Image (cartoon, rainbow, N blue to C red):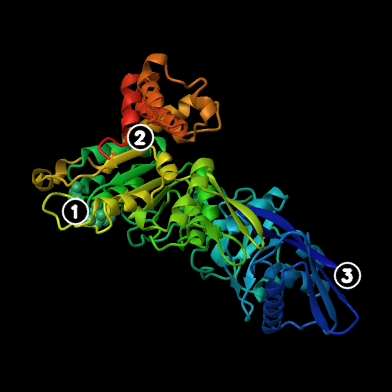
Amino acid sequence: MAVARTRCVAILGVTGHVIEVEADISNGLPGMHLIGLLDTALNEARDRVRSAVINSRYGWPDSRITVSLFPASLPKRGSQFDLAIAVSLMGAAGAVPIERVAEPFFLGELGLDGRLRPVRGILPAVAAAVEAGARRVVVPAANAAEAALVPGVTVIPARDLRELVEWLRHGDLDRPPTWGAEPAGPGAAAPAGPGGSGVPEGAAGSVGPARPAGPDEGGPLPDLRDVAGQPMARKALEVCAAGGHNLWMLGPPGTGKTMLAERLPTLLPPLPLDHALEVTAIHSIAGALPAGRPLLTRAPFVSPHHTATVAAVVGGGSSAPRPGAVSLAHRGVLFMDEAPEFATTVLDSLRQPLESGTVTVSRAAGTVTFPARFMLVLAANPCPCAQASEPASACRCTPTARRRYMARLSGPLLDRIDVKVTVARSSRRELLADRRFAEPSEVVAERVLLARERAAKRLSATPWRANSELPTGALHGDLRPPPAAMKPLTACLDSGSLSARGLDRVLRVAWTLTDLSGKDHPEVTETSAALAMWLGAGL
Ligand SMILES: Nc1ncnc2c1ncn2[C@@H]1O[C@H](COP(=O)(O)OP(=O)(O)OP(=O)(O)O)[C@@H](O)[C@H]1O
Ligand SMILES: [Mg+2]
Ligand SMILES: [Zn+2]
């Protein structure tokens, strides 16, 4: 008997790392020794693999089995190594030819009966395999559509260990198996062709039936047409959508703040392919990919409840760190409704991602960094009793109580909000007006797209696409508005009402207003409007 080798992938953060798996069967006390896995994962993998092999009606070697996963230094958590462990030890036992298990990558968790269960993070895992030169990847059938998003590789969907082993023994490795006529499982795509499948076919072909409405899902979306009046808030939404800016809405209950925020995704263009793959990889690692929709093409909209913990918002978990709400909202919208109700630790934890577009999570198992470039939308009532703060309202809160409530949103956090807007109650006339004449999302989205294209064109020689991504160096270099346009800002800097960070935020919004108006560079109209939005006139 010889040593059998194969490969699989471990996910760290959002990156896949190739893992070499080696199995050896030697004389000695019968038993299975797994080297290179962390404690609990090790015992679980051993038990699953053993049961799966025996229940697939193969003999279990009655000698000393050693399976080693390299590099040992890389933390390996999760169950996606089961399949590679099983096929390598069957190779070492002579049950399958070792040269046939050596070339493909094997990813998947084994059920005790030998069935292959889907695993998280297939997209980044297959991408890492392809980068390492893989030509074939064996994945659980339920993950096949997601795996097929990666071009240049043949995806072999497998349903159970026995079927796979028989194919490895006798099948044609250049022709992925079809496993009979019935579909391979929910969300499974047809096996990719030998040359690997391109993204659009694999993705479009496997989009499932429409699910219940939800902004990041396939169902119908809400529309800005439903919102009566609110011209200021509508404008603020449009500007934020066009530049990717952060928004704060302050207003009494029932004025449409939640309604407006939920309509922001309808103004955003579909994700370009590279962003769609990034977003899909994160949702896959979090186990949050909707079934039957392997590629997320819409900007995500994530709305954590105000009782959410820091771990749920920034990421964490007791074993392998998982992406939190800020990363699930990557390239989309993070909406924090009733913002002052969130724990201040949660609100403060947003500062790092808002500044850097990434979030670093430290756990005993190591430190990982997840992408987290999102638009933050905060909504708040002006006082804790959530009673309207208008004359004749039931609010009995003291000015101190109100101030304390608002102070929960710290200065440094509000400093990072580009656009602040007061949402007042719509008038009776506005509410009763014929809503068929209200501007629908589609029309606003066209203006947003045009403005985004202008920005992308101006920034084509740079790594940035949206104005919100502009670093301070660029804002004060080539992109500094002419002196006349800077005048309103210098006055505020002198009086101390504008901070250095605020200045950069105002400049970014000024560029977005410029793109929306079709001008070449910001004039005093744009800089003063951007300044008013940052200061939050009326707040
Ligand atoms: N401007 C508006 N146009 C149309 N309907 C509105 C408007 N404002 C409020 N409504 C109606 O009131 C309901 C409540 O609005 P929404 O939940 O968005 O208010 P809110 O400002 O988020 O309130 P709260 O502070 O209590 O969360 C909406 O579902 C809608 O039916
Ligand atoms: Mg609300
Ligand atoms: Zn009150």
Secondary structure category for the residue under label 1: loop
Relative to 88, residue 469 above or below? above
Residue 398 x %, y %: 24, 54
Q: Amino acid at mark 2?
A: Trp
Within-10-Å neighbours for mark 3: few <14, some 14–19, many 20+: few
The disc label shown at residue 534, or none? 2
Left/right of residue 173 with respect to residue 222 in the rendered view: right
Relative to 317, residue 340 above or below? above
In this orientation, which residue lies closer to the viewer: 376 or 444? Answer: 376
Q: Nearer the viewer, mark 3 or mark 2?
A: 2
Q: Earlier in the sequence, mark 3 or mark 1?
A: 3
Q: Amino acid at mark 1?
A: Ala
Relative to 165, residue 172 above or below? above
Quickly name the residue at label 1: 388
Mark 1, ligand 3, within 8 Å: the answer is no
Residue 343, picture quadrant: bottom left
Q: At x 37% / y 31%, what residue is drawn?
A: 497
Q: Earlier in the sequence, mark 2 or mark 1?
A: 1
